[in-house]
Amino acid sequence: MEMNGVGWIAAIVVGGLAGWLAEMFMKSNNGLLMNIILGIVGAIVLNAILMALNIGILGVGWIAYLITGFIGACLLIAVGRAIRR
């Protein structure tokens, strides 16, 4: 099984990097596991949003997965902050 052109192990590594970048950008304080989850789930959520808007996926490969994971993780952090307040 592959996710957006990357394998499962690459998705975990790139998702962790995307979550960490989002954590630094949004100035939140998450752990390593949460960064990985935010990066992977963020990429999945953003791909679903883009497909629902008929925009399509940003690309295939680990760089596209990193970009979608970063943007999706930032969106998830913002939504989490809005719900907590």
Image (cartoon, helix red, strand yellow):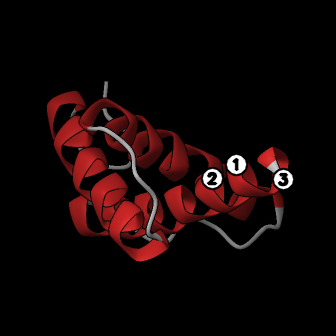
* Position of the N terminus by quadrant: top left
| Mark 2–mark 3 distance (CA, rounded to whole Å) | 14 Å
Answer yes or no: do the residues labelled 1 and 2 have beta carbons within 8 Å? yes
Element type at mark 1 = helix
> How many numbered marks, from 0 up?
3
Where on the picture, by quarter, is residue 44? top right
Query: Would residue 33 appear left or right of 22 to someone viewing this image?
Result: left
* Residue located beneath label 3 in the image: 85
Query: Would residue 51 appear left or right of 21 to someone viewing this image?
Result: right
Residue drawn where x is 51% and y is 40% of the image: 41
Q: Amino acid at mark 1?
A: Gly
| Mark 3–mark 1 distance (CA, rounded to whole Å) | 9 Å
Give x and y (percent) for residue 72: 55, 59
Residue 21 visible to the viewer:
yes
Q: Nearer the viewer, mark 2 or mark 3?
A: 3
Q: Amino acid at mark 3?
A: Arg
Element type at mark 2 = helix
Q: Nearer the viewer, mark 3 or mark 1?
A: 3
Q: Amino acid at mark 2?
A: Leu
* Residue located beneath label 2 in the image: 76
- Mark 1: few, some, or many residues within 10 Å (few <14, many ≥20)? few
* Residue located beneath label 1 in the image: 80
- The tag earlier along the polypeptide, 2 or 3, is 2
Residue drawn where x is 40% and y is 52% of the image: 29
